[in-house]
Image (tube, helix red, strand yellow):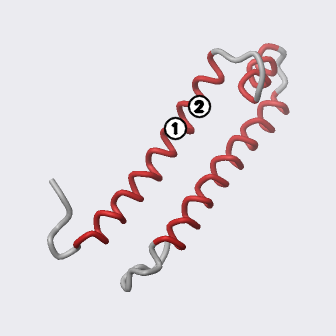
Amino acid sequence: MGAHPACGAAGGVARGHDRLRYSLATAWLALVFGESINADAGIGFLMNQAREFFRTDVIVVCLVAYAFLGLTADVIVRTLERLLLQWRPTFTGP
């Protein structure tokens, strides 16, 4: 199963890049899940400690930190997409 013949290589690159973004999101979910299960340092550890001591303010700050890191990673991937796919005449950017 490949790209549509009319799309050529450009369609495959664009679809591959979408897969990269979805894989990045899945990797972030796995990181957060794994860190919250078995961590002795880091944001997941802070969240577990805060949960045990009912420190909702720390939990909110940790969630904001996770969100900021995820959005930063997405911005980096979108910037790479804009730079690497600018040769396509039909590419308008995300």
Q: Which residue is mark 2?
A: 31
Residue 49 shown left or right of residue 37 in the figure: right
Which residue is drawn at the image coordinates 22% and 72% (left, top)? 8
Mark 2 secondary-structure assignment:
helix
Measuring from the top left, give residue 61's x and y in whole percent.
81, 38
Q: Which residue type carries mark 1?
A: Ala
Measuring from the top left, give residue 55's x and y in whole percent.
84, 24
Q: Which residue is mark 1?
A: 27
Q: Which residue type carries mark 2?
A: Leu
Measuring from the top left, give residue 51's x and y in whole percent.
76, 19
Q: CA distance from mark 2 to mark 1?
A: 6 Å
Which residue is drawn at the image coordinates 41% and 79% (left, top)? 91
Measuring from the top left, give residue 77's x and y in whole percent.
55, 59
Query: Which quadrant holds residue 3?
Result: bottom left
Which residue is drawn at the image coordinates 29% and 63% (left, top)? 12
Query: Which quadrant holds residue 42?
Result: top right
Q: Residues within 10 Å of mark 2 (few under 14, many from 20)?
A: few
Q: Residues within 10 Å of mark 1 (few under 14, many from 20)?
A: few
- The residue closer to the viewer here, 66 or 59, is 66
Residue 77 shown left or right of residue 57 in the figure: left
| Residue 55 circle label | none
